[in-house]
Amino acid sequence: MEFNWKLFLTALGLAFILEGLPYFLAAEKMPTVLKALSERKPGELRGLGMTAILSGLALLFFLRASGG
């Protein structure tokens, strides 16, 4: 199996877009959001991150299984 650089870079570009959207669309609220996140316990942040990872993996799994 060959590594698909085009697909990888496309996914990375999409990740950058999605990460940048909140800062662009709600720049005035981001300091409050970031402060609230900084006050959370590491375990809570880890759980949030794991939920995001598992959701992404599930989405990819179902998309690939459906032939998409």
Image (tube, rainbow, N blue to C red):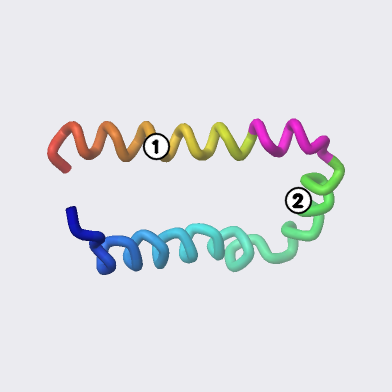
Examine the image and state in which quarter residue 6 appears: bottom left
Quick one: label 2, few (<14), some, or many (20+) residues within 10 Å?
Answer: few
Q: Main secondary structure of the magenta part?
A: helix
Q: Taking 23 as reference, is 28 left or right?
A: right
Q: Amino acid at mark 1?
A: Leu
Query: Which residue, given by chain and number where applicable, does mark 1 sit on?
Result: 57
Please tell me whether mark 2 sits on a helix, a strand or a loop.
Answer: helix
Q: Nearer the viewer, residue 17 or 25?
A: 17
- Residue ID at (74%, 57%): 29
Q: State which tag comes first along the sequence, 1 or 2.
A: 2
In-front residue for pair 62/33: 62
User: Image check: 38 left or right of 45?
Assistant: right
Q: Which residues are magenta?
A: 40-47
Does residue 44 belong to the magenta stretch? yes
Q: Amino acid at mark 2?
A: Val
Q: Indicate left or right for 65 with 52 as reference.
A: left
**Direction from residue 58 to residue 25 in the image, left or right:** right
Q: Position of residue 14 (x, y in %)?
A: 40, 61
Which mark is drawn over residue 30? none
Q: Position of residue 61 (x, y in %)?
A: 29, 34
Q: Residue drawn 69% across and 65% down?
A: 27
Outermost residue toward the right in this view? 39
Badge 1: how crowded within 10 Å, few (<14), some, or many (20+)? few
Between the C-alphas of marks 1 and 2, the distance is 26 Å
Identify which residue is drawn at 19% across, 59% down.
Answer: 2
The percent coordinates of residue 51 (x first, y second) are 55, 32
Q: How many marks on residues?
A: 2
Q: Quadrant of the C terminus?
A: top left
The vertical placement of 40 against 11, above or below, is above
Q: Which residue is mark 2?
A: 33
Circles 1 and 2, Cβ within 8 Å, touching? The answer is no
Answer above or below: position of 43 versus 12: above
